[in-house]
Amino acid sequence: MKKNNFPKLHNATWPGVVGKGEGAEPIISLDTLLERTATAVVDGVKFDGIDLGLFDEHIRMDASDDEIKQLVDKVGTLDLVIGTLVAPVWHPSGGAAMGYAEERRRFVDVVRRACRFGEKLRKLGIRTNNVIRIDSASSVNEWLKNPVANSKLIAQTFREACDVAEGFGERLAAEGEICWGGMHSWRVMLDTLEQVNRPNIGFQADMAHTLLYLLGYNSPEDRILPTDFEWSDRGTFQAGLRELTEQLRPWTIDFHVAQNDGTVFGSGSHDKTGRHCLASDPNGKLDIATDAGFWLRDSHGELTKAFNHICWDGCMFPNTVMEKQDTWDDILRAMVQVRERHGWYAAE
């Protein structure tokens, strides 16, 4: 029997930027991240590609055609491809999706620029999907001041962004992360997606972030696990995860494999969000290979095949950890285990 070759296995580049710089640890260069990704190997299996954050520290969103071609050559030479892109919808180039009219205009403009970048990568043959990640770029505390009105504004901005993305043949994936207003609980996230009501928007599930939906951080009324829950109770945990994924899986178009120790952590705009752990962290609460199946299989246990690649997301690890090759080998090993359990083989 041939080994599963789908979904493809991607690494993320934004952990080299998120939580770095501005008084924190130095930013890790794109070249370094590409090298570590390309060098990782587990039993002959390597990463297939990267998901790319469009941050100036790595690649300008308004890069010239020559700069984009240089990126394509650099990634292609390493036998990698590019998948999902991250649109930097936050300040200073963007603005809150529920903010003033000018902020919302900038938000949509960032999406437009990211879509233009993504379309160029697809035409050059290096990009394998058409998904761009967004969030509301809005704080939970501000959202709570007027939930109904603010959710309507976010949905309106997202609709405008979807209309722009459609013109480039792109889809938008709304990130389920508890630090973003209007996206900070599973119920609120679902309401936002339903209000947007566009065929080219979906949900991006990150195992580390969605775990916190179960615990009701920033939205205790939407907690799924009982307040006296003990992590040793895998049956209750899996029942909660099943309930969560039944709601959001039909919307999921992009998926991040990750680990979480059940606590929150962050810095700057990512305060009070999921604490990404290393795949081998003994404090991790997820059985990565097993629990990924709740997102990758439907309620009958059948593969959804909703996306052609999955990505590892591990932000805010110390640079000393991220610069070790062993770190990426361990991460790749976890990704391979997910594919072995929930993947498929397709002729290429």
Image (cartoon, helix red, strand yellow):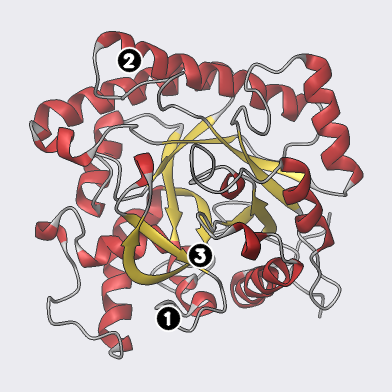
Say the numbered circle drawn on residue 103.
2
Percent of width and height locating residue 346: 76, 61
Q: Earlier in the sequence, mark 1 or mark 2?
A: 2
Q: Height in image: 130 above or below 336? A: above
Image-quadrant location for residue 47: bottom right
Q: Are marks 3 and 2 in contact (CB under 8 Å)?
A: no
Q: Secondary structure at mark 3?
A: loop
Q: Residue 5: image x %, image y %?
A: 75, 64
Relative horizontal placement of residue 92, taking residue 17 as reference (left or right): left
**Where is mark 1, residue-wise?**
283
Residue at screen point 54% across, 58% down: 314
Amino acid at the residue labelled 2: Glu
Front-most of residues 226 and 195: 226
Residue 235 lies, with reference to residue 66, above or below; the image says below
Q: Position of residue 28 (x, y in %)?
A: 66, 46
Say if residue 76 shows up in the picture: yes
Task: Identify the image quadrant of the C terminus.
Answer: bottom right
Left or right, 40 with respect to 167, comes to right
How far is mark 3 from mark 2, CA to CA?
A: 32 Å
